[in-house]
Structure formats: structure tokens, C-alpha cells
Amino acid sequence: MAVTARDRIDGVLAGKGVIVCAGSGGVGKTTTAAAIAAALAAGGQRVIVLTIDPARRLADSLGLPKLGNEECRVDPERLAEAGLGGDGELWAMTLDAKRTFDELIERTAPDAETREAVLANPIYRQLSNAVAGSQEYMAMEKLYELHGSGRYDALVLDTPPARNALDFLDAPGRLSRFIDSRSLQVFRASGRAGLGLFGRGIGVVMSVLERATGVDLLRDLADFFNAFGGMAEGFRDRAKRVEALLRDDATTFLLVTSPRAAAIADAGYFHGKLAGSGMPFGALIVNRVREPVAAQADDPELAAELTRSLGEPLARKVRRDLEDRNGLAERDARNIEAMRADLTDGRLLTVPELSGDVHDLDGLAAVGAQLFAR
Ligand SMILES: Nc1ncnc2c1ncn2[C@@H]1O[C@H](COP(=O)(O)OP(=O)(O)OP(=O)(O)O)[C@@H](O)[C@H]1O
Ligand SMILES: [Mg+2]
């Protein structure tokens, strides 16, 4: 790949209050989100990064406690030591889906009795832990809440590895659909008797389960749906507002990918989906790009020198390693060129593979330095 003036992310992020980092598993979403937040804070903004399940060492270096859902300010002195000092503020928080769900119930429930009924309900506990997409939905919910607080100039949102790339975009809608679903209506309308509509089979299974577990599943279900159903309006309303925030001009989506074929395919699919759902796409960030080593393995002068100083067997190994590395770098470069050709909007930025994991503020500063013109 020809070395050209690199694109920078500054222009993409100017005036953006919500920055969402999305992409498939393990590509560097959490790292990128934290690095961008740190760089924006160093540039003078009050920024919070909402992380999801960060590696323990990264969480430690951000000063995040084990349990989530707490806004924590990153120590300005430590930031300054890593060259990230500035007039801004960097805050971080780990999203804990279950706890956000509980807080949401506490806010939405019309009265204390309903709130307690829902929170204590075994079905609710199962649901809030396990319902598909609850983590995605809750990330959106928290984002909305913090945005509304007005405490931050910019919110940078990390997202869970997208099993289905669109899980989290669709999360508010899915919750609304669940609330509106016929099964929920049936439960609300008729409680225990409603199960009859599902046929005798379920009723039999339920009663066997009840006998086996001692838990009155039917009553729990009916109680749950009755309490939950009363809050449907509030949920639906919030889901709409979250969606509006995501579509806002002051929001931008950054798609993170590795330079490998499978991740690129995911990113392409996701890019199409973003456009289809009217979400603003800002840039494609190709992370962990392997760069060529200046030396060529077949350079006879280099070969001679390696043999002289290392002896032939070791020299041969070094040459082979060099060849491998340059081969991978060439493949990455070809993949990137193909992505660039396919990309009709937004920018493509690259971040090289750094030596060692990015688990501390120095590492975040190094990633940030690749993305921003500073
Ligand atoms: N440019 C880079 N150079 C070297 N290591 C990197 C780079 N970017 C990320 N890493 C490392 O790659 C690993 C995965 O990064 P990260 O946790 O940010 O990915 P993720 O997309 O958030 O993963 P998940 O989908 O599991 O949440 C981490 O160990 C991180 O330190
Ligand atoms: Mg992550």
C-alpha cells in the first residue's frame, strides 16, 4: 500500500455528542471507545466512555470497580502521566445490564407496590438476566439517561460483540414488540386462565414443573405480566426516544473491524444495516493492521549480514519470519484497499497492531495518537 497522508478522525467527531463503537467480537471496540474518549477529554471535553465487559487490566487502569453502573472519573494525574492531560474530564463506567434493568423498573413503575412486585418476581429475575438483547437494550437505555443528564459533552459507547450485528440497534424495538406481543396481552387479560390459549400441552408441562420445583409458575407468570403490562407505555415511549437519539445528527457510528476477511464481511453487512435503519455512519476503523517491516527477506545484502551475525540456521528463521510478516502486511493492505474502494460514505482509518495488548493509559494514548491529528 502506498504511504499516503492518513485520514484522521477529528473531522468525523467534530460536534458529535454520541459516538457508538460497533463491530464483531474481539476486533477492538472497547479499546477504540476508551482511546477515543481519552483523546477527546485530553482535547478539553467532558467525556464518558460506557464500556461493556472490559478486560480487567483495562478496567483497573481506568480506575473502574468490579461492579458496574457507576460513573468514575479517571485520575487526571494518571492521564497526564500517559500524555493525556488536558482541560477536559475523562469518566468511565461499565454497563451492567441487570442493574440498569432494575433501575429502569424503579423509574418506570407507577408505585412502590408495582416496583416491588416486579423486582421480586422470579420470572422478572429470569427475564432481566436472560432475555435476548437485554444487554443491548440496557446499553441504549443508559446512554439515553446520561445524555439527558447534560453532564457530558460527549458520550462514547462501547457495544457488546454483536452476534447478529444489529441486535443492539433493534433492541428498543424488540422490547416494544415484546410488550405489545399477543402472549403478553393474553397474560395480562386473563392471568392464569390465559394459558389455556396456548393449549393443554403447556398447562400440563407447567403443572409438572410446579410439582417438581415447588414454584407456582403460572401464578408468577400472571403476576409478572400484570405488573409489567402496566408499564408498557413508559417503555415504549423511552424506546422511541432512544431510537431518535441514535438517528440524531449529533450521533455517529464508528464501525470497528480487523483487516481479516470474516470481520470485513461483518462490517460490510453492518454498514448496510446502519444505512437501512437511518443511523449515521461516521467511519470504518480497521484495527490491528499489520505493517510491513522495512527490510525485504530476499535482500541479498541483508541475508549475508544475518548469516554473518547469527549463523545460517537462525538467519534462515529470521528471513522466514520476515517473509511471513511482510506477507501478512501485504494481505492486510490488499484487504484495506478493497474496503476503501467499497466505501461510498464516511472515512476509513487504520490503527496498526501495537506490540502487546492495549491495557493501560499509555496504550490508549498510542491508539488515540493513530486516530487523531494532535
Ligand atoms: N491496535 C491494537 N494493537 C494491539 N492489541 C490490540 C489493539 N487493539 C486491541 N488490542 C487488544 O485486542 C484485544 C481485544 O480488544 P477489545 O477488548 O477492545 O475488543 P472488543 O471488540 O471490545 O472485544 P469483545 O467483542 O470481546 O468485547 C485486547 O486484548 C486488546 O488489548
Ligand atoms: Mg469489548
Image (cartoon, rainbow, N blue to C red):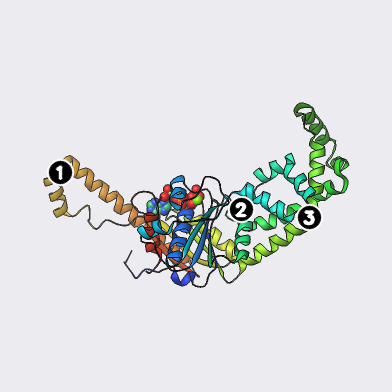
Secondary structure beneath dot 1 equals helix
- CA gap, disc 1 and disc 2: 54 Å
Estimate the x, y position of residue 124 in percent, counting from the top left: 72, 44
**Marking on residue 310:** 1
| Label total for image | 3
Residue at the (79%, 41%) spot, across then down: 221
Going from the N terminus, do you reach mark 2 or mark 3 first? 3
Residue at the (27%, 47%) spot, across then down: 321
Foreground of the two, 131 or 91:
91
Q: Which residue is mark 2?
A: 136
Please state which amino acid type lies under the numbered disc 1.
Answer: Leu
Secondary structure beneath dot 2 equals helix
Residue 211 shows in the view: yes
Image-based side of 298 in relation to 88, left or right: left
Secondary structure beneath dot 3 equals loop
**Marking on residue 221:** none
Res 32 quadrant in image? bottom left
